[in-house]
Amino acid sequence: MNKSAVIGFRIKELRTEKKYTLKYLSEQTGLSIGFLSQFERGLTSIAIDSLEKIAKVLEVELSSFFDLSSPQETKYVVRSYEKETTLVNSEIIEYALTDHLTSFDLLPRLVDIMPPLPEEKETLELYNHTGEEFIYILEGILTMNIDGITYQLYPGDSVHIPSCIPHNWSNKTNHITKILTVHSPNPLKKEG
């Protein structure tokens, strides 16, 4: 993510904390609501004089927008715009929900499962591993196979299984399916 996008997200965070609307910020700075909305979402850049107007309204120093370095202390909070993203394959995008991918026992991730490609084969290969996993369906329909039994899971449904049972999941719809997964033990954890 570029620095301009990070600054935009930071401004949205400050504006929300102060309970200021985009309309209010627009009126106070003379910048259009559309521009401010695009900047907060990281879709455009901003001139320094406009950024200075925003800083004044939000009652922060202009320099605070440029201090984008991470503190030296251990970081426990991951902001929505800071999530590490991994493209697993053409159908799966994973978002890390922790900055401790290799040190904690639990591995929480948000997963977007794209609709299947037309040439994708219909059979779902089951696999197993050590530990346990929890899956919560946030959006869409997840097809889950657990030990040869197929389930259609909907938003709000969840699965908690010992991972030694053969299992796998897929999206067989035309829409994105979003799930929250938590694995234990963390397969990425470094020993020692």
Image: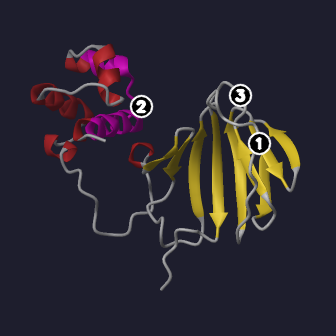
Range shown magenta? 5-27
- Name the residue tied to disc 3: 173
- Name the residue tied to disc 2: 19
Within the image, what quadrant is residue 13 found in?
top left
The three-letter code of the residue at mark 1 reads Thr
Q: Which residue is at 72% across, 46% downward?
A: 169
Label 1 element class? loop
Disc nearer the start of the sequence (3/1): 1
Residue 23 lies within the magenta run: yes
> Please, which residue is most extreme toward the right here?
149
Our reading of the magenta stretch's main secondary structure is helix
In this rendering, the answer to whether 34 lies above or below 174 is: above
Query: Which label lies toward us, 2 or 3?
Result: 3
Label 3 element class? loop
The three-letter code of the residue at mark 3 reads Thr
x, y percent for residue 191 = 50, 82
Q: Which residue is at 14% across, 45% downward?
A: 63
The three-letter code of the residue at mark 2 reads Lys
Residue 107 lies within the magenta run: no
Task: State the mark number for residue 123.
Answer: 1
Task: State the mark number for residue 141.
Answer: none
Most foreground residue, 167 or 74: 167
Within the image, what quadrant is residue 28 found in?
top left
> Please, which residue is most extreme toward the left here?
49
In this rendering, the answer to whether 144 lies above or below 188 is: above
x, y percent for residue 90 = 52, 38
Work out whether residue 156 can be spotted: no
Quote the CA–CA distance across marks 2 and 3: 39 Å
